[in-house]
């Protein structure tokens, strides 16, 4: 009885060490591949803009282009 309990404890400890070693190896591999072993959250894919937002964005870009054309036509350097 004591032998089987001792074997079970050793099996659990061995499993924990194997898991720890696998995690450490993965971190080392990621550090070699990316230069950093930090785990970061990847942002979700952006949602497509609704048609009204797309139109508003297109209008704003057109106004910006028109303003740039006007400043270039007047010989004024745009301030960045």
Image (cartoon, rainbow, N blue to C red):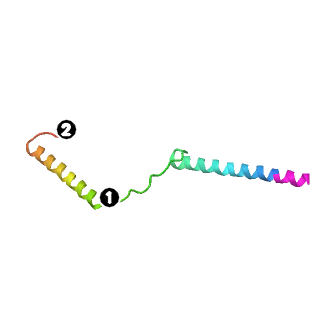
What number is the disc on residue 2?
Answer: none
Element type where label 1 sits in the image: loop
Q: CA distance from mark 2 to mark 1?
A: 30 Å
Other residues around mark 1 within 10 Å, as few (<14) / some (14–19) / many (≥20)? few
Q: Residue 51: give x, y in percent of width and height.
A: 27, 61
Q: Is residue 19 left or right of residue 79?
A: right
Other residues around mark 2 within 10 Å, as few (<14) / some (14–19) / many (≥20)? few
Q: Residue at x 31, y 60 (%)?
A: 50
Q: Is residue 4 magenta?
A: yes
Q: Specify start and end residues of the magenta stretch as a single range.
A: 1-8
Closer to us: 33 or 80: 80
- Name the quadrant of the N terminus: bottom right
Q: Is residue 52 magenta?
A: no
Q: Is residue 28 left or right of residue 43?
A: right
Which residue matches tag 2? 79
Q: Residue at x 15, y 39 (%)?
A: 77
What number is the disc on residue 49?
Answer: 1
The numbered mark, 2 or 1, whose residue comes first in the sequence reads 1
Q: Residue 72: give x, y in percent of width and height.
A: 12, 45
Q: Residue 65: give x, y in percent of width and height.
A: 17, 50
């Amino acid at each position: 009885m004591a032998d089987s309990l001792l074997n079970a404890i050793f099996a659990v400890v061995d499993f924990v060490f194997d898991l720890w070693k696998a995690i450490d190896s993965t971190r080392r591999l990621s550090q070699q591949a990316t230069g950093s072993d930090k785990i970061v959250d990847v942002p979700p894919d952006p949602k497509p803009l609704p048609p009204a937002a797309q139109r508003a964005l297109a209008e704003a870009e057109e106004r910006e282009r028109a303003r740039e054309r006007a400043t270039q036509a007047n010989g004024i350097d745009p301030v960045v």
